[in-house]
Image (tube, rainbow, N blue to C red):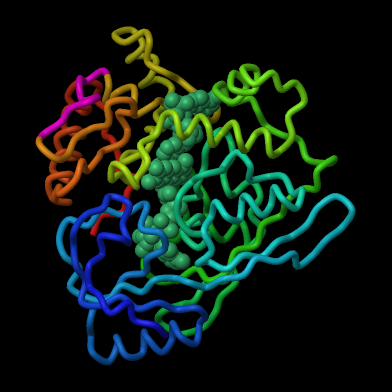
Amino acid sequence: MSPYNMTSLQPYNTFGLDVNSKQLLTFKNTDELLDHLNQLKSSGEPYLILGGGSNVLFTSDFEGTVLKNEVGGISVIEEDHESVIIEAGGGEVWHNLVLWSIQNGYGGIENMSLIPGSVGAAPMQNIGAYGTEIKDVFVSLDAFEIASGNLRSFQLEDCQFGYRESVFKRALKNQFVIIRVRLKLTKVGFHKINTSYGMIENELKEQHILNPTIKDVSDAVIRIRQSKLPDPKEIGNSGSFFKNPILPKEQIDKLKNEFPDIPVYPVDENQVKTAAGWLIDQAGWKGFRDGNFGVHKNQALVLVNYGGAKGKDIYDLSEKIIESIKEKFGIELEREVNIY
Ligand code: FAD
Ligand code: NAP
């Protein structure tokens, strides 16, 4: 139990917003978490669970305690000749887990290289990138139920994973703290790499790599991300601010008459996905800047803090973008980032 002796949350949110909380406490295991929660419950003070702070927007100071997950550990808990089941503490850095898996020759999460944040937050929105989502390798997780103080195990079907969604973001919101996550990874030799996501193939071709390894795929993803996305250490941001909309096919068919270039990716028989970044770009927001905040110049899905911005200003900008996309395309964008 180690208080940071500071209340500024600036180092703990990738938007780099200069907000405060009453205190920030860490927990390395469920006993420490339980101690904190018991104290907070008796004082009635609000609290918030935080991992890497890469998917949050603070619109004001947080009038309570931030509980930062530092549950560590990565290990193999089961193994056969083709695969392993690994278990990782919720406070581990996601990208470190990816690097560890590559070093050990376990495939399955290399396409999700360089996603910021913690292992514990990864199932929250079923993180995904370059054609892979955590649900594709997910086995189970242990989560601490705040009301009862009990640890509960969730299997794949219990998590109700969807596109950037899970039961923890919806029906069970704010009720559980994810402590440990288990994933099934495949040993090199049995693992089928996935380079079908356009940019990866191009990147591998440019490097003259014909038979890519999981490390080659990871390196390619890292290079693409570094070339396209703003680094939060330089420009504050929380990645994609909005989700890509999933729409009924008939709606897209109608839109195609007016906007023939609208990107369309099939989801199932009746639904398709379009790219929120394209819609925002077409509505003229890409590169928009109002003083110290705006829309990134290369990636319209990413709202940015150029330094010293207020979270409320970024939130208000997101409202304006939502309104303008509704007006132009009749599509209601949904925020991916968690607002506080
Ligand atoms: P936080 O921001 O700390 O928390 C997010 C939410 O989860 C909060 O509501 C918090 O209360 C809750 N939470 C956190 N930990 C726990 C826990 N252990 N138990 C219960 N609740 C918890 N996301 C993608 O899916 N794909 C990408 O490719 C991607 N790229 C990104 C690129 C950049 C540059 C940035 C800044 C973000 C990107 N993101 C991406 C978003 C973000 O990295 C992920 O959502 C990540 O999983 C958030 O982890 P975190 O630990 O930072 O969560
Ligand atoms: P991009 O390659 O410019 O593509 C734009 C959008 O089109 C993406 O959001 C992607 O949807 C979709 N898309 C592209 N090719 C696709 C295909 N073959 N099949 C299905 N959908 C396809 O995207 P980008 O912005 O550079 O991001 C690259 C990847 O990193 C994406 O997977 C994206 O989700 C992920 N990423 C996520 C965040 C975040 O904060 N959530 C931030 C940065 C990057 P999907 O998003 O569904 O893949």
Residue 74 sits above or below residue 131 on the image:
below
Task: Identify which residue is drawn at 75% across, 68% down.
Answer: 77
Q: In which quadrant of the rendered view does residue 214 lie? A: top right
121 sits to left or right of 317: right
Residue 129 sits above or below residue 282 on the image:
below
Q: Nearer the viewer, residue 89 or 134?
A: 89
Residue 100 visible somewhere in the drawing: yes
Q: Nearer the viewer, residue 111 or 316?
A: 111
Residue 266 visible somewhere in the drawing: no
Residue 317: image x %, image y %?
Answer: 15, 38
Residue 191: image x %, image y %?
Answer: 78, 40
Q: In which quadrant of the rendered view does residue 24 lie? A: bottom left
Task: Identify which residue is drawn at 32% across, 77% down.
Answer: 4
Query: Which SS type dominates the magenta stretch?
Result: loop
Residue 269: image x %, image y %?
Answer: 55, 27
- Report the number of discs: 0
Residue 152 sits above or below residue 190 on the image:
below
151 sits to left or right of 337: right
Judge whether residue 191 is colored magenta.
no
Judge whether residue 283 is colored magenta.
yes
The N terminus sits in image quarter: bottom left
Residue 211 sits above or below residue 172 on the image:
above
Q: Nearer the viewer, residue 78 or 261?
A: 78
218 sits to left or right of 5: right
Q: Residue furthest right?
A: 81
Over which residues does the magenta segment extend? 282-290
Task: Identify which residue is drawn at 20% across, 77% down.
Answer: 22
The C terminus sits in image quarter: bottom left
142 sits to left or right of 42: right
Residue 219: image x %, image y %?
Answer: 61, 35
